[in-house]
């Protein structure tokens, strides 16, 4: 093995394969110049690894807070107490629904709806049609009386 | 991952400001120190630290919670520093520009301090000389040195963190350390050969 500075650096970095480590160690045992070079490199390694006390600037907390304020995702709040469309409708129609509750037979509406099931729209349309016909007959009758 | 880190990250994801504050407070010294080592300048390190804070806050939702936090943070810092150095050196000098052959202690101190190098040579401290020499290194050399000796990353890990080819990482390390060794040789009066 030849004297190689780069190989000594890789050796100190702990990046050599086992076989190569043995070779370097054998070489070091026989080569005084490389032993001297290794001790010099070790000194450099120690200095480079020594933790340097870098003074922290006083602006850091301010910068940290600025970044949080600028980029933090705002959490979505649960929509407590904010009524939706149907809640408003319920409230708006409550007086009417309370009044109708006192009408005779109103308690049966629920049962009627259950019984009619899907046919309810048809039933409503049918009843509207009958109401319309009665209305027209009444108007026609009224006009006839007026001519007399 | 450190249990507290994990807990803090989860709380941050809920959008809790206090958790962000605690997490950044815990690592702001590390972030600033690493930025300082990579750039060698206080003002640059401050600017980069702020960029890292922003990046951490915005990228945290994408962080994999079962992974350790610190390596992820280091990657963020290195990327931010690399981008910054690339932007900055576009018009001035190359990131890996050679520091030249005349990397003597006298030159180093003259560049670092502006004082009369001959006067200072007599009582200069190794630490001070090393810092001045590091500041004169090309940014990428300084970057790989910091990752190797301060962060204790392997060659492969440095290559992965910086996106540099493995061979380039080794070359930068060897060249940088050879130059620093020259400075040491002058300080200690080593006989060569």
Image: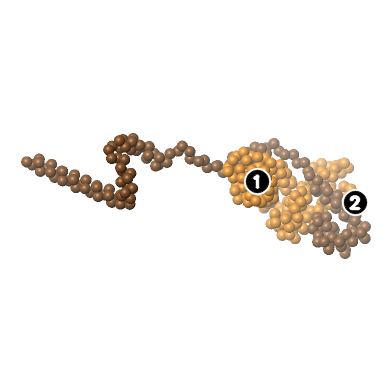
Question: Which chain is brown in the rendering?
Answer: A
Q: In the picture shown, does residue B166 fall above or below A146?
A: below
SS under mark 2? loop
Residue A119 bears which disc, if any?
Answer: none
Residue B120: give x, y in percent of width and height: 85, 42
Residue at image coords 30%, 35%: A102
Kindly identify the residue that appears in the image at 65 percent across and 37 percent down.
A62
Q: Are marks 1 and 2 on the same chain?
A: yes
Pick the residue in front: B72 or B111.
B72
Question: Which tag, 1 or 2, sits closer to the chain's start?
Answer: 1
Q: How many neighbours does mark 2 have within 10 angstroms: few (below 14), some (14-19), or many (20 or more)?
A: few
Q: Chain of mark 1?
A: B
Which residue is outermost to the left?
Answer: A148
Residue indicated by mark 2 = B190
Looking at the rendered structure, the number of numbered marks drawn on it comes to: 2
* Image disc number at residue B6: 1
Q: Is residue B45 visible?
A: no
């Amino acid at each position: 093995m030849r004297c190689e500075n780069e190989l000594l650096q890789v050796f100190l970095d702990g990046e050599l394969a086992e076989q190569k480590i043995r070779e370097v160690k054998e070489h070091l045992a026989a080569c005084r110049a490389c032993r001297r070079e290794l001790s010099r490199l070790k000194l450099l390694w120690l200095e480079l690894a020594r933790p340097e006390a870098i003074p922290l600037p006083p602006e850091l907390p301010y910068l940290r807070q600025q970044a949080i304020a600028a980029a933090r995702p705002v959490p979505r709040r649960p929509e407590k107490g904010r009524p939706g469309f149907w809640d408003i409708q319920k409230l708006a129609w409550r007086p009417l629904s309370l009044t109708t509750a006192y009408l005779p037979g109103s308690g049966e509406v629920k049962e009627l709806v259950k019984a009619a099931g899907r046919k309810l729209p048809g039933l409503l349309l049918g009843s509207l049609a009958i109401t319309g016909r009665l209305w027209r007959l009444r108007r026609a009758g009224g006009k006839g009386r007026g001519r007399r | 991952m450190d249990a507290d880190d994990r807990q803090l990250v989860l709380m941050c994801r809920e959008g809790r400001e206090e958790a962000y504050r605690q997490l950044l407070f815990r690592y702001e010294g590390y972030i600033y120190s690493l930025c300082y080592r990579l750039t060698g300048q206080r003002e640059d390190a401050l600017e980069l630290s702020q960029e890292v804070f922003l990046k951490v806050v915005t990228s945290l939702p994408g962080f994999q919670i079962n992974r350790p936090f610190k390596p992820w943070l280091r990657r963020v810092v290195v990327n931010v520093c690399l981008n910054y150095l690339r932007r900055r050196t576009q018009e001035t000098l190359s990131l890996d520009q050679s520091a030249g052959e005349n990397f003597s202690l006298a030159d180093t101190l003259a560049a670092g301090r502006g004082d009369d190098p001959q006067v200072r040579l007599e009582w200069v401290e190794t630490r001070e000389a090393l810092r001045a020499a590091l500041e004169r290194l090309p940014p990428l050399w300084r970057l790989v040195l910091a990752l190797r000796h301060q962060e204790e990353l392997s060659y492969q890990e440095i290559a992965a963190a910086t996106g540099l080819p493995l061979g380039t990482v080794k070359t930068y390390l060897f060249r940088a350390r050879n130059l620093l060794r020259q400075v040491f040789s002058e300080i200690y009066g080593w006989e060569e050969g």
